[in-house]
């Protein structure tokens, strides 16, 4: 009997990563569609898109984060939101192993630092720049609103709390096993 | 629903999804490049006209516009606080007191009108794309444009799952409300707390469970077996209409760049409309 030759496969995303993208990306999209959000100073709103894309980035790595960012950022103001969510999730993915490998309070400190840097850079620079291009609001006014009102800090808190809870409660799913070349390494945690 | 496909047999429905992606990108480019209310209104009217030609019912468009118009108008009104034109011409004072004054300039008003047309145009364009193209076709178009196949599958799975998730989240909300849950009224802090603790926790818990189920379902259907050589039930092919549409879209894009502040500058915030309004009001710089 001849043996079936299985072709050598190169997987960019594993089924687990696709599952996480579909589940969390879909949830973020569904919440936007249901209009579950808290309006702040326009154009800012609070909803769960940030924590969800951050969780995907942390759990499944930068490539999965990139896709989730596209899914979440595309439907509303893609010029502003697409790069914002994509880079947020990608960035969370890039630093996920560093965060995961730290133990105790250091892990939460890393989380705080990573999301503070990401939100400051994305909201403060990209958000302000894109709003000034798209809506004509002066760049420095947007920067001032972002940094000197509670908006940025609410966004950071939302990301950090959701990710910390997820890492504490479901470590088996949050363990970052992604590889730069695509796919995932076998799980190490018990 | 955020992406409700309305089936039809119009020429626009029959266009290749890649052409529709180019249409979407062209509109975004024009909306970004232009700031002039007349130019942006032309884009808005074109999108509305296209929606009608595609057979999108009028009540779908009006209900969508009604849903977003308060946000857009409110946003534009607040924007007045931040807009500072370089050489302003006072139209009237909205508020004038010792402590606080809010002047309305001709330039601010023109910019606000442009802003409204721009916001509505972008929202309608995304909505129209999703109304005349099934999401699976958009993803297939992206895959044909050399987007990685596994990324395409991830996107199709996600979009296919959204109706289930909407239903599930509605049920979570209804279950919470039936037990006397209040979302916090007008207090932002209480609302945020309610949103994070009562809504987010069950939603994330269910999501983790579902992520595993999706992964198992995908693996059982041979997801990771030679993914790069996948075939598709539907094959895409460009027709004559697609080439004509892309030529028109590229020409429009070129016109957009030409009239932007990079070259002629008619389409910018201080472009055609401001010149016309100043001429009508007899304002000379």
Image (cartoon, rainbow, N blue to C red):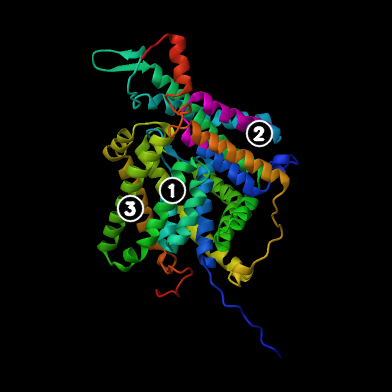
- Whether residue B43 appears in magenta in the rendering, the answer is yes
Residue B189 picture location, percent across and down: 35, 39
Answer with left or right where residue B207 lies relative to residue B196: right
- Mark 3 lies on residue: A115
Residue B199 picture location, percent across and down: 46, 48
The residue marked by circle 2 belongs to what chain? B
Residue A113 picture location, percent across and down: 28, 55
- Mark 1 lies on residue: A83
- Looking at the image, the residue that sits furthest to the top is B282
Q: Quadrant of residue B80?
A: top left
Residue under disc 1 on the same chain as residue under disc 3: yes
Residue under disc 3 on the same chain as residue under disc 2: no
Q: Is residue A142 above or below residue B92?
A: below
Q: Are marks 3 and 2 in contact (CB under 8 Å)?
A: no
Residue under disc 2 on the same chain as residue under disc 1: no
The mark closer to the camera, 1 or 3, is 1
Q: Residues within 10 Å of mark 3 (few under 14, many from 20)?
A: many
- Mark 1–mark 3 Cα distance, whole angstroms, equals 16 Å
Mark positioned earlier in the residue sequence (1 or 3): 1
The residue marked by circle 3 belongs to what chain? A
Q: Quadrant of residue A152?
A: top left
Answer with left or right where residue B32 lies relative to residue A141: right
- Mark 3–mark 2 Cα distance, whole angstroms, equals 42 Å
Where's the N terminus of chain A, which quadrant? Answer: bottom right
Q: Which residue is at a point 49% across and 45% down the rendered structure image?
A: B176
Q: Which residue is at a point 38% across and 41% down the rendered structure image?
A: A127
Residue B251 picture location, percent across and down: 59, 38
Total of numbered circles in the picture? 3
- Mark 2–mark 1 Cα distance, whole angstroms, equals 28 Å
Q: Label for residue B50?
A: 2
The mark closer to the camera, 3 or 2, is 2
Answer with left or right where residue B136 lies relative to residue B211: right
């Amino acid at each position: 009997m001849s043996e079936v030759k299985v072709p050598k496969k190169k997987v960019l995303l594993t089924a687990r990563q696709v599952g996480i993208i579909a589940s969390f990306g879909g949830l973020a999209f569904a919440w936007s569609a249901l209009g579950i959000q808290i309006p702040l100073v326009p154009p800012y709103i609070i909803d769960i898109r940030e924590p969800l894309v951050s969780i995907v980035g942390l759990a499944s790595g930068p490539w999965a984060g990139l896709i989730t960012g596209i899914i979440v950022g595309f439907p509303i103001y893609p010029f502003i939101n697409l790069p914002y969510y994509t880079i947020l999730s990608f960035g969370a993915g890039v630093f996920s192993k560093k965060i995961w490998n730290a133990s105790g309070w250091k892990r939460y400190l890393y989380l705080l630092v990573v999301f503070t840097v990401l939100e400051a850079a994305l909201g403060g620079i990209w958000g302000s720049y894109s709003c000034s291009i798209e809506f004509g609001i002066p760049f420095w006014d947007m920067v001032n609103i972002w940094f000197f009102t509670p908006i940025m800090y609410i966004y950071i808190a939302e990301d950090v709390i959701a990710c910390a809870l997820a890492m504490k409660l479901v470590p088996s799913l949050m363990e970052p096993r992604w590889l730069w070349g695509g796919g995932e390494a076998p799980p190490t945690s018990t | 629903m955020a992406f409700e496909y309305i089936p039809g047999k119009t020429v626009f429905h029959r266009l290749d999804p890649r052409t529709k992606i180019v249409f979407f990108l062209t509109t975004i480019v024009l909306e970004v490049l232009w700031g002039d209310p007349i130019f942006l209104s032309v884009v808005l009217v074109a999108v509305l006209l296209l929606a009608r030609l595609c057979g999108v019912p009028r009540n779908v468009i009006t209900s969508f516009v009604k849903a977003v118009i308060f946000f857009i108008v409110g946003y534009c009104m607040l924007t007045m606080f931040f807009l500072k034109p370089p050489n302003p011409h006072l139209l009237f004072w909205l508020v004038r007191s010792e402590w606080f004054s809010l002047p309305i300039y001709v330039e601010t008003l023109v910019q606000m009108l442009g802003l409204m047309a721009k916001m509505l145009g972008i929202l309608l364009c995304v909505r129209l794309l999703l109304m005349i193209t099934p999401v699976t076709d958009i993803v297939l178009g992206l895959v044909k444009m050399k987007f990685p196949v596994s990324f395409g599958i991830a996107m199709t799975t996600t979009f296919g799952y959204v109706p289930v998730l909407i239903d599930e989240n509605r049920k979570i909300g209804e279950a919470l409300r039936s037990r006397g849950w209040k979302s916090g009224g007008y207090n932002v802090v209480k609302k945020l707390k309610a949103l994070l603790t009562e809504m987010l926790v069950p939603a994330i818990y269910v999501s983790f469970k579902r992520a595993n189920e999706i992964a198992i379902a995908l693996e059982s259907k041979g997801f990771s077996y030679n993914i790069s050589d996948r075939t598709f039930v539907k094959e895409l092919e460009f027709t004559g209409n697609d080439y004509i549409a892309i030529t028109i879209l590229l020409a429009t894009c070129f016109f957009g760049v030409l009239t932007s502040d990079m070259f002629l500058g008619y389409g910018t915030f201080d472009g055609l409309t401001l010149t016309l309004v100043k001429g009508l009001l007899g304002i000379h710089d």
